[in-house]
Image (cartoon, rainbow, N blue to C red):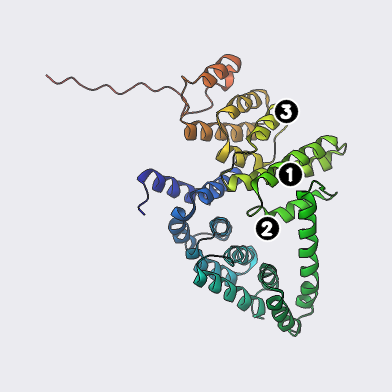
């Protein structure tokens, strides 16, 4: 299927943004490319060869979210590169293990097993590959684990003992959180979200956002409040990666209540799924802040929403913003009314 020129232009721009040093810009690009799905795969995989390691990790996160068979070759290459890139490659392959394309699922499985059992591969990449196999039948994991136990590397053997335990604990924590019991370790819940957010029911993620917000409000400790807020931001980012707007109300209300900069994950979600109702809270937050960096991030989110929703200065929301927050009225370059070009009359 041919890609429309506007979509192709967006894909080029977003792929370039994966190399941005700005976290919000980079994370927003990952989420928007994930929503574009298979249409973005060719452009993203083509960019891999010439990218630096940090950008390669971002590319692999896009491929993990899309789970397209065309990403297998890049993910296999990433395993050989090691480090964070290799770990990201294992995650991208994990997403393909249940691909409806049998050859892709087989190739992903073979690559993970090969990496896990290869002594020349970096230890943490081997463990990441083994961890990626946790959803496979028990007999498969046991055979791989048995082979790895005979490896002779004490660090590898210790990791093998810990990995199943960690996986079981994360699964238990996630199930409890989905049922409303968040536990007392926000960092552990945030870690569990990394592997479960892509497949969790949207309603479950929305319920978790509400529950985490209540826990955050009930916590007296500032560090704990910040930790729970980071979990809530990660949940919003997980929804944004899937293009879901079910929790936009929480983004809007959080902005209305914010007295300090929010985690970058909230801004990422605003970039991707924020709507017209978010513009006034953004303008208010932008007007009252003295933090230049936060104001810049809010301005970028405002502009992204205005562009996506095609909101001009004639829009009622923009008129209210101009009246209530004059210093924020010019936030969006898109929303400014531009004079129509004149054409000469034919004589």
- Numbered mark located on residue 251 in the image: none
Secondary structure beneath dot 1 equals: helix
Residue under the point 59% across and 42% down: 244
Q: Is residue 43 visible?
A: yes
Of badges 1 and 3, nearer the viewer stands 1
Q: Of the two numbered discs 2 and 1 on the same chain, state the one appearing first in sequence.
A: 2
Residue 334, x across and y down, in percent: 46, 29
Looking at the rendering, which quadrant does residue 299 occupy? top right
Q: Quadrant of the C terminus?
A: top left
Residue 295, x across and y down, in percent: 62, 31
How many residues crowd mark 3 within 10 Å: few (<14), some (14–19), many (20+)?
few
Q: Nearer the viewer, residue 26 or 51?
A: 26
Residue beneath label 1, please?
Answer: 208
Residue beneath label 3, please?
Answer: 257
Residue beneath label 2, please?
Answer: 195
Residue under the point 52% across and 65% down: 100
**Depicted 48 relative to depicted 118: above or below:** above
Residue under the point 53% across and 56% down: 66
Q: Is residue 21 visible?
A: no
Give how far apart the Cα atoms at labels 3 and 2 are: 30 Å
């Amino acid at each position: 299927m041919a890609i429309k020129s506007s979509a192709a232009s967006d894909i080029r721009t977003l792929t370039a943004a994966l190399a941005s040093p700005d976290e919000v810009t980079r994370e927003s690009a990952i989420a928007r490319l994930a929503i574009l799905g298979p249409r973005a795969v060719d452009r993203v995989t083509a960019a891999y060869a010439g990218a630096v390691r940090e950008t390669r990790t971002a590319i692999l996160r896009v491929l993990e979210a899309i789970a397209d068979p065309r990403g297998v070759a890049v993910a296999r290459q990433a395993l050989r590169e090691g480090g964070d890139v290799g770990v990201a490659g294992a995650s991208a392959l994990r997403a393909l293990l249940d691909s409806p394309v049998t050859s892709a699922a087989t190739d992903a499985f073979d690559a993970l097993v090969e990496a896990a059992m290869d002594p020349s591969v970096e230890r943490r990449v081997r463990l990441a590959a083994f961890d990626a196999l946790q959803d496979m039948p028990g007999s498969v994991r046991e055979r791989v684990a048995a082979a790895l136990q005979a490896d002779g590397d004490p660090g590898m053997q210790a990791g093998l003992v810990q990995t199943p335990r960690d996986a079981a604990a994360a699964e238990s924590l996630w199930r409890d959180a989905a049922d409303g019991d968040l536990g007392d370790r926000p960092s552990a819940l945030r870690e569990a979200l990394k592997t479960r957010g892509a497949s969790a029911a949207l309603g479950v993620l929305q319920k978790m956002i509400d529950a985490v917000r209540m826990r955050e409000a009930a916590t007296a400790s500032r560090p704990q409040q910040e930790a729970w807020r980071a979990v809530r931001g990660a949940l919003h980012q997980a929804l944004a990666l899937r293009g879901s707007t079910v929790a936009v109300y929480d983004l809007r209300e959080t902005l209305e209540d914010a007295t300090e900069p929010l985690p970058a994950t909230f801004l990422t979600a605003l970039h991707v799924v924020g709507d017209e109702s978010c513009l006034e809270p953004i303008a208010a937050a932008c007007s009252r802040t003295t933090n230049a960096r936060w104001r810049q991030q809010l301005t970028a989110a405002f502009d992204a929403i205005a562009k996506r929703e095609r909101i001009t200065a004639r829009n009622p929301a923009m008129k209210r913003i101009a009246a209530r927050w004059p210093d924020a009225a010019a936030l969006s370059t898109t929303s400014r009314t531009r004079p129509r070009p004149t054409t000469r009359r034919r004589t």
